Amino acid sequence: MGKVQVYQEPDRETRVQIQESVRGKDVFIIQTVSRDVNSTIMELLIMVYACKTSCAKSIIGVIPYFPYSKQCKMRKRGSIVSKLLASMMCKAGLTHLITMDLHQKEIQGFFNIPVDNLRASPFLLQYIQEEIPDYRNAVIVAKSPASAKRAQSFAERLRLGIAVIHGEAQDAESDLVDGRHSPPMVRSAAAIHPSLEIPMLIPKEKPPITVVGDVGGRIAIIVDDIIDDVDGFLAAAETLKERGAYKIFVMATHGLLSSDAPRLIEESAIDEVVVTNTIPHEIQKLQCPKIKTVDISMILSEAIRRIHNGESMSYLFRNIGLDD
């Protein structure tokens, strides 16, 4: 482990000082995301740039949770922030990225360097098999159709059934405030030719919450990649309880658990929330005993070893299909 000093100046500027030579060496920078995500990003960028200007042979970033990954699509008049962050990392000098369970696999295309997107599902599947005694009576639940592929992957590996909750409140994209669907300011023959009338998009109407699949008398295991704002998980748990599920587990790779999420989980119908240690959450565990942690450091350390020794990474992606 190299010696690096990272601190903030009184004006909150981040300063990095590498205290030993990295010339001609492979440098692995392990960076987890703290609550102050923007300071975390600046620390990483400055450290990568410091290694680059110190003539490091290669600079490999080990970022278990890639920040801003939820902002990977254009929303109204926003921006694709994860693309910006990827460009900044590459410009700073990063030559390789190791991460885990990107929110969308397509984020790999934002980088012009190799990206190894590792999977936490083997560790979560092992937890289900070893820590849930009657897991054979379980059903894997997707809390929205968007997470159905992940639920299907878990269900097929555990030889279990699947259920999908439809009608959950999702991010609204109102056509009234989205510039892409705004009509011209002036509707006249000069502005729009009568024969070129543009059809209006039919507005969305969310149906009542329904559960596609049988959960009565079963253990419900909700799977997702990120658990941060827990309102959607709490609503799903209430719905599953009403449909007859007698135990409810939530499995996720990244446990951000922001704000008062621990308190809400403790007071909810959820029996247990299982997340990996891609993000530090010791404080949240003290606030909510229902939160359990699965250690995934083994696969990260093996990825580092293989890259350093020039070995193939394919062993870490065995039995992973295109849809996983």
Image (cartoon, rainbow, N blue to C red):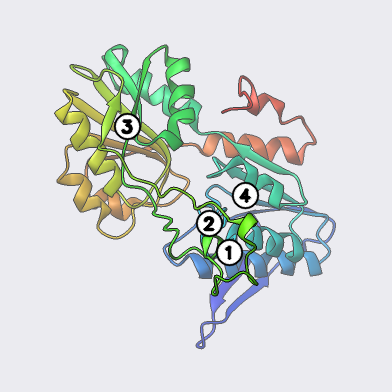
Element marked by disc 4: strand
Element marked by disc 2: loop
Measure the alpha-carbon separation of dots 3 and 4: 34 Å
Are the residues flagged by discs 2 and 1 in contact, CB closer than 8 Å?
yes
Identity of the residue drawn at 62% across and 49% down: 62
Q: Up-down: is 84 above or below 96?
A: below
- What is the three-letter code of the residue carrying label 1? Ser
Reading the image, the residue beneath label 4 is 62
Which marked residue is nearer to the observer: mark 4 or mark 1? Answer: 1
Identity of the residue drawn at 52% across and 88% down: 11
Are the residues flagged by discs 4 and 1 in contact, CB closer than 8 Å?
no
| Residue 270 can be seen in this image | no
Are the residues flagged by discs 2 and 4 in contact, CB closer than 8 Å?
no
Q: Nearer the viewer, residue 135 or 187?
A: 187
Measure the alpha-carbon separation of dots 2 and 1: 8 Å
Are the residues flagged by discs 3 and 4 in contact, CB closer than 8 Å?
no
Reading the image, the residue beneath label 1 is 79
Reading the image, the residue beneath label 3 is 165
- What is the three-letter code of the residue carrying label 2? Gln
Q: Answer with left or right where residue 12 lies relative to residue 112.
A: left
Q: How many marks?
A: 4
- What is the three-letter code of the residue carrying label 4? Val
